[in-house]
Amino acid sequence: MAKRGRSVSLDGLVARLSALDKERVDILRKLSGAISALGGEHVPWPFRTPGSVRPLGSGTTNAKPGRKRKSKMSAAGRAAIAAAQKKRWAKIKKAKDKKRMSDGGAVGNA
């Protein structure tokens, strides 16, 4: 059988594959660090390092995996937030009315 193209030594091929494997491991390590830095709780399989992620279903809540528990706020808390927002709106409206009066009552964007 005739040779096609150039011949490749087996030692050179093994060395190149070994270098590529080391590069792959380094890239996976960097990606894993980047994902965890971005706040990714559940890192996808190829980027996971042993012991880096808590196994699914091992949590203390009864919530289904992948779902967040609904946050509950008391009626008093909602009322306090609403009152504070109304106070902010009143302050803004007062400042607008004051500006309008100082402009001589002009209306529009002239």
Image (tube, rainbow, N blue to C red):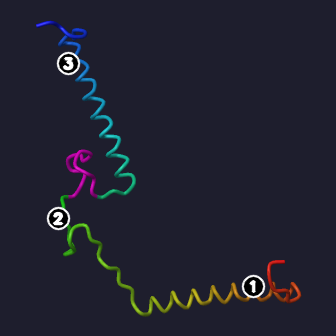
Judge whether 44 appears above or below 95 on screen.
Answer: above
Q: Residue at x 80, y 78 (%)?
A: 109
What are the residue bounds of the magenta stretch?
42-54
Dot 1: element: helix
Q: Which mark is residue 95?
A: 1
Q: Nearer the viewer, residue 72 or 109?
A: 109
Asked if residue 51 is among those painted magenta in the image, a careful observer would answer yes
Residue type pointed to by label 3: Val
Quadrant position of the C terminus in the picture: bottom right
Q: Residues within 10 Å of mark 2 (few under 14, many from 20)?
A: few
Q: Give the residue type at disc 2.
A: Ser
Residue 10: horizontal and vertical position, in percent?
A: 17, 13
The mark nearer the N terminus, 2 or 3, is 3
- From the viewer's perspective, is 57 left or right of 89? left
Which structural element holds mark 3? helix
Residue matched to label 2:
58
Residue 80 left/right relative to 64: right
Residue located 73% across and 89% down the image: 94
